Amino acid sequence: MYLQATGGLFTNGFFMIAMLAVLVFTMILPQRKRSKQQKAFMSSLTKGQRVVTASGILGIVDKVEDNVISLNVGNKTYIQVTKNAISKELTDAIYPAKTDA
């Protein structure tokens, strides 16, 4: 009986570690990759770039200051948003990249 109990404990521990590894590879690592891509995108914002904010506002970058972006959203209508409010480039929002399925 004692051998079966330790074998069961070893098996349960192995499955817990395997589940943790699956969690890391399916959720945590892809999230880190997306976060790095978003930070790189935010730091590469330039004047004239068409972007979408997180709330869905479409605009053209007019001025880039430290953490504040001025967006032209219409006929000489400007709004100021923080850099982290910019979600993605407009072409990525309308025409998402195709993924291999």
Image (spheres, rainbow, N blue to C red):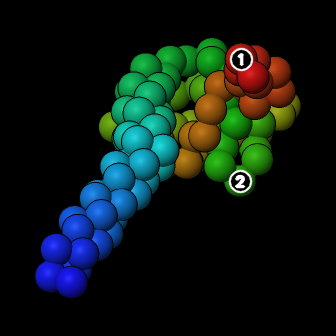
Mark 2: few/some/many CA within 10 Å (<14, 14-19, 20+) = few
Point out the residue furthest to the front here: 1
Relative to 28, residue 9 above or below: below
Using the rendered image of the protein, determine whether residue 99 is visible from the camera's viewpoint. yes
Asked if disc 1 and disc 2 are in contact, CB closer than 8 Å, the reply is: no
Relative to 28, residue 42 above or below: above
- Going 21% across and 84% down the picture, which residue do you hit? 1
Residue 88, image x, y percentages = 62, 32
User: Residue 100: which disc?
Assistant: 1
- The amino acid marked with disc number 2 is Ser
Location of residue 10 (image quadrant): bottom left
* Camera-nearest residue between 94 and 44: 94
* Camera-nearest residue between 95 and 10: 10
Which residue does the numbered mark 2 point to in the structure image?
55
**Badge 1 element:** loop
Label 1 or label 2, whichever comes before in sequence order: 2
Residue 99, image x, y percentages = 71, 20
Using the rendered image of the protein, determine whether residue 72 is visible from the camera's viewpoint. no
